[in-house]
């Protein structure tokens, strides 16, 4: 690395404060990105195995990272008011949950069901964040990105992002060398609350966006551990999707199994219920445990090690498969060495 960008570098660092599971692994180098022009300088100087991080609330380090970690600290928000909608630009390093609160405070409803999801705006398109019947893709117009191989920036239309349930083009291996610098959202002025998700059905149809947001925050705080207090990465596994035939077999044996009918695409099952009822004992490995209020969340009780996390996750997968013949796929991203890997 040359000297022109030396002021950008922190130094080889512990990754403990860069991800919410708080494991004691290290990275060769961490750089805080506060301006897009820094990316071009770094690309020119030669980045090694770059890994972009927001708040690290969906990543697991299972060993040291032998590459350059880029921490997204790009800030800024813009609004253009059109006749029928608000067009919003959010810089990638903004906090997602703070941006949701800000949008509601500005009387721009739409994002309330996605309140209190940890992490940065720039990570929201990566797994197409979703909660309570709404997904990021429902509002996304375009994603602004910088290619970490060429240094070129582009605007990718939402229709080219391949958004799906907890997935997007940014999860494909071919699209990993990309730094998302910001997103464009469209919030229509004609608004009505989305209350289809079971937990929100107590609200009345004339609930305001603020009331919906407050309810979502209330429900989340009851079930989900605060990642900045108790290490975790939210849902560890995706909710599995099974065929109609497999679903009919399962529901006969387990009539209380929660499910979502996806029409021709099959049935989505609640992985948390499967884990809670799979008979795994103990639900713990060292200081890594299944969260008591939400079995889909694994937590670091303090001194947890990534080896124990992998062991517990594997035991859960095996046990759920043995009991229900359902495969659980991780939702989180695993990193060590020079990139992403797939240990489970
Ligand atoms: P990171 O963990 O830093 O990164 C995640 C992935 O995105 C990594 O592969 C990283 O390389 C990549 N990435 C991050 N930023 C960029 C960028 N700018 N450019 C390119 N790639 C990038 N998710 C949901 O969908 N719904 C929920 O309800 C939900 N609830 C959660 C609750 C808790 C308690 C926790 C801890 C997590 C929850 N999550 C949920 C998961 C997490 O909040 C989201 O995945 C979030 O978008 C991660 O943001 P981050 O900035 O922490 O990303
Ligand atoms: N359930 C159990 N036991 C558990 C957990 C859940 O029986 O331990 C049951 C609940 O009673 C409910 C059903 O499973 O009937 C669904 O539970 P919940 O509403 O908590 O949602 P989830 O399916 O466990 C998903 C997302 C969450 C998102 C919520 C709300 C995935 C993998 N997870 O969880 O997203 O916040 O719905 O929409 O899709 C995340 O991605 O990190 C995340 C937290």
Image (tube, rainbow, N blue to C red):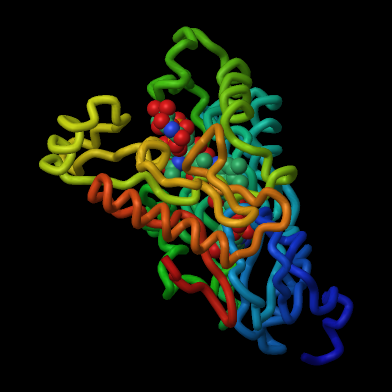
- Kindly give the residue lying farthest to the right in the view shown: 7
- Residue at point 27% right, 52% down? 322
**Left or right for 341, reference 119:** left
- Residue at point 64% right, 53% down? 287
In this rendered view, identify the residue nearer to me: 82 or 172.
172
In this rendered view, identify the residue nearer to me: 264 or 186.
264
Q: On screen, 107 above or below 22?
A: above
Q: On screen, 324 above or below 211?
A: below
Give the quadrant of residue 92. bottom right
In this rendered view, identify the residue nearer to me: 47 or 284.
284
- Kindly give the residue lying farthest to the left in the view shown: 245
Q: On screen, 80 above or below 62?
A: above
**Left or right for 261, reference 114:** left
In this rendered view, identify the residue nearer to me: 92 or 319.
319
Q: Position of residue 281 (x, y in %)?
A: 45, 46
Work out which quarter of the rendered image holds the N terminus and state it. bottom right
Q: Position of residue 111 (x, y in %)?
A: 55, 32
Quadrant in which ligand 2 is drawn: top left
Q: Position of residue 246 (x, y in %)?
A: 15, 43
- Residue at point 62% right, 74% down? 63
Give the quadrant of residue 227. top right
């Amino acid at each position: 690395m040359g000297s022109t960008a030396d002021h950008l570098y922190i130094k080889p660092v512990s990754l403990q404060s860069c991800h919410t599971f708080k494991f004691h692994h290290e990275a060769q180098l961490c750089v805080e990105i506060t301006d897009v022009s820094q990316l071009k300088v770094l690309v020119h100087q030669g980045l090694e195995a770059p890994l972009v991080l927001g708040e690290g609330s969906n990543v697991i380090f299972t060993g040291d990272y032998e590459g350059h970690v880029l921490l997204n600290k790009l800030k800024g928000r813009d609004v253009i008011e059109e006749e029928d909608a608000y067009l919003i630009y959010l810089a990638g390093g903004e906090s997602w949950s703070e941006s949701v609160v800000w949008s509601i405070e500005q009387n721009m409803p739409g994002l309330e069901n996605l309140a209190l999801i940890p992490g940065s705006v720039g990570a929201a398109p990566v797994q197409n964040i979703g909660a309570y019947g709404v997904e990021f893709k429902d509002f996304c117009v375009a994603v602004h990105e910088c290619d970490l191989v060429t240094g070129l920036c582009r605007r990718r239309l939402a229709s080219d992002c391949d958004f799906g349930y907890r997935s997007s083009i940014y999860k494909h291996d071919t699209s990993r060398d990309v730094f998302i610098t910001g997103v464009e959202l469209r919030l229509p002025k004609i608004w009505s609350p989305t209350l289809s998700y079971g937990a929100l059905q107590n609200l009345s149809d004339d609930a305001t966006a603020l009331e919906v947001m407050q309810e979502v925050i209330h429900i989340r705080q009851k079930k989900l551990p605060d990642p900045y207090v108790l290490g975790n990465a939210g849902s560890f596994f995706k909710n599995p999707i099974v065929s109609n035939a497999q679903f009919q077999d399962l529901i006969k044996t387990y009539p209380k199994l929660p499910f979502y009918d996806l029409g021709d695409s099959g049935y989505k099952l609640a992985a948390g219920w499967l884990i809670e009822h799979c008979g795994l004992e103990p639900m713990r490995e060292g200081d890594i445990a299944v969260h008591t209020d939400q079995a889909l969340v694994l937590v670091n009780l303090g001194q947890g090690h990534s080896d124990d996390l992998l062991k517990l996750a594997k035991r859960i997968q095996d046990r759920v498969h043995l009991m229900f013949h359902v495969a659980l796929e991780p939702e989180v991203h695993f990193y060590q060495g020079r990139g992403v890997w797939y240990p489970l």
